[in-house]
Amino acid sequence: MRMRLALPLIAATALLAGCAGNAISPTYTSVDPDLMRIGDDRPADPEKRVEEMGSYCLEITETWNDHGTTPDGQSLWAKDTARKVVPCS
C-alpha cells in the first residue's frame, strides 16, 4: 500500500525537478562556416553555378538569410540553397 502512494509522489518530484532545472544553453557554432555565420554584416551571396550531373545539369543558387539573433543580439545568418534542373550547355 505504501508503494502505491509513494510512486505518484516520486513521479511528481522527478517531473518538477526536470522542469525546474536550468535549460540547456544553445551553442551557435557550426563545423562548416559556409553554412552558418554570426555577425551583423550580411555575407555576400555566391554566384550561381551550373554542375553537370551526367544526363542533366543543375543550376545552384545560394543565398544568405537572416535567421534571428543570438542571446547577445548578434545576427544569425544561414545559407539557403536552391537547385533547378537546366539544359546542359
Image: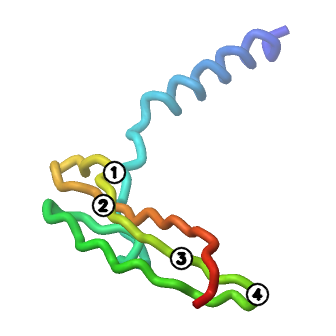
Q: Considering the numbered disc 3 on the image, is that residue within a helix, a strand or a loop?
A: strand
Q: Look at label 4 and name its amino acid.
A: Ser
Which of discs 3 and 2 lies nearer the camera? The answer is 3
Left or right: residue 44 compared with residue 20:
left
Q: In which quarter of the image is the C terminus?
A: bottom right
Q: What amino acid type is highlighted by mark number 3?
A: Glu
Q: Residue at x 85, y 8 (%)?
A: 1
Earlier in the chain: of badge 3 and badge 1, it is 3
Q: Which mark is residue 77?
A: 2
Q: Name the residue under label 4.
A: 55
Q: Which residue type carries mark 2? A: Trp
34 lies above or below 6: below
Distance of label 2 from label 4 (alpha carbons): 34 Å
Classify 10 Å Cα crowding around label 3: few (below 14), some (14-19), many (20 and above). some
Return the mark for residue 59.
3
Q: In this view, does 27 lie to the left or right of 53?
A: left
* Callout 2–callout 4 Cβ contact below 8 Å: no
